[in-house]
Image (spheres, rainbow, N blue to C red):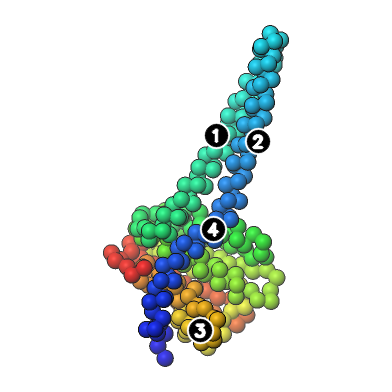
Amino acid sequence: MSDAPPPLVDALLQALMQRDGQALVGNLVPGFAHEVSTPIGNCVTVSSTLADKTRAVAASLQEKSLKQSQLVAYLADAVDAATLLERNLLLAHELISRFRQTTLDQAGALRRRFDLEETLHEYAALLRHRLKKTPYELQLDLPSHVEFDSYPGALQQVIDHLVSNAQQHAFAGRSIGLIKISGQASADSATLDIDDNGIGIAPEHLPHLFALNVATVPGQALRLGLFRVHELVTKVLGGNIKVSSSPDAGTRIQIKLPRMAPPEHAA
């Protein structure tokens, strides 16, 4: 039996696939809000404290009771406050810029140059918030200074689907779990290994792992996750993907990608 999507669901499939990017961004919002709330909260606290001290100094000056030691202490506090404000505002700006770039990548299937390690580390920081309340750990071990001319949004969707799939299925009945993304690069390509130490996959399921699972029971939905991964890797990013696994021995999903994506894609 062919693994291609049946004609009757093809149009629906394309429509649902286009919504992946929006759904991914929506899933990242809680993590982003949590991350950015810390520096913003610090700024509010520091600015409020500085305002109180400024009013106290102004009152002493108005009453002509301001002492030199009080002024010196205030100026030292003001310098410290300015340093803290600058540090936290720069952090907030960096977080907002990263999230904005992720949003743009997802919304427009944007092709651009990007550093593999930097892009995946930034995205992993948001994914870790999703895993924070689970017993599962995400680790990265990626080569440095590997530049891509490709679609970072598509790559983020691939990683998102694979991490989510491992979170939902790889560790059934286990109290802990590790997901590790490692890689190596050559002059014109890079290979990513996404490993988990979970329960593994039965051999009979491996040949159809990336097939579209069409629901036959009323009320069930199309299962797009791993099928979408295959479509993104092969049709958008121009690479290939394979899986090796066995029961109780974990799973490795290996993705080989050209560092320069094909000129056209069918996302």
The CA distance from mark 2 to mark 3 is 53 Å
Does label 1 or label 4 sit earlier along the sequence?
A: 4
Q: Which residue, given by chain and number where applicable, does mark 1 sit on?
A: 86
- Type of the residue with mark 2: Thr
The CA distance from mark 1 to mark 3 is 54 Å
Looking at the rendered image, the quarter that the C terminus falls into is: bottom left
Image location (x, y in percent) of residue 7: 37, 84
Q: Secondary structure at mark 4?
A: helix
Crowd rating for badge 4 (residues with CA inside 10 Å; few <14, some 14–19, many 20+)? some
Query: Of tags 1 and 3, which is closer to the observer?
Result: 3
Query: Of tags 1 and 4, which is closer to the observer?
Result: 4
Does label 2 or label 3 sit earlier along the sequence?
A: 2
Looking at the rendered image, the quarter that the N terminus falls into is: bottom left
Does label 1 or label 3 sit earlier along the sequence?
A: 1
Q: Which residue, given by chain and number where applicable, does mark 4 sit on?
A: 28
Query: Of tags 4 and 3, which is closer to the observer?
Result: 3
Q: Which mark is residue 45?
A: 2
- Residue at 52% x, 39% y: name it: 90
Q: Secondary structure at mark 2?
A: helix
Q: Which residue, given by chain and number where applicable, does mark 3 sit on?
A: 215
With respect to residue 180, does 76 lie above or below?
A: above
Does label 1 or label 2 sit earlier along the sequence?
A: 2
Image location (x, y in percent) of residue 36: 57, 47
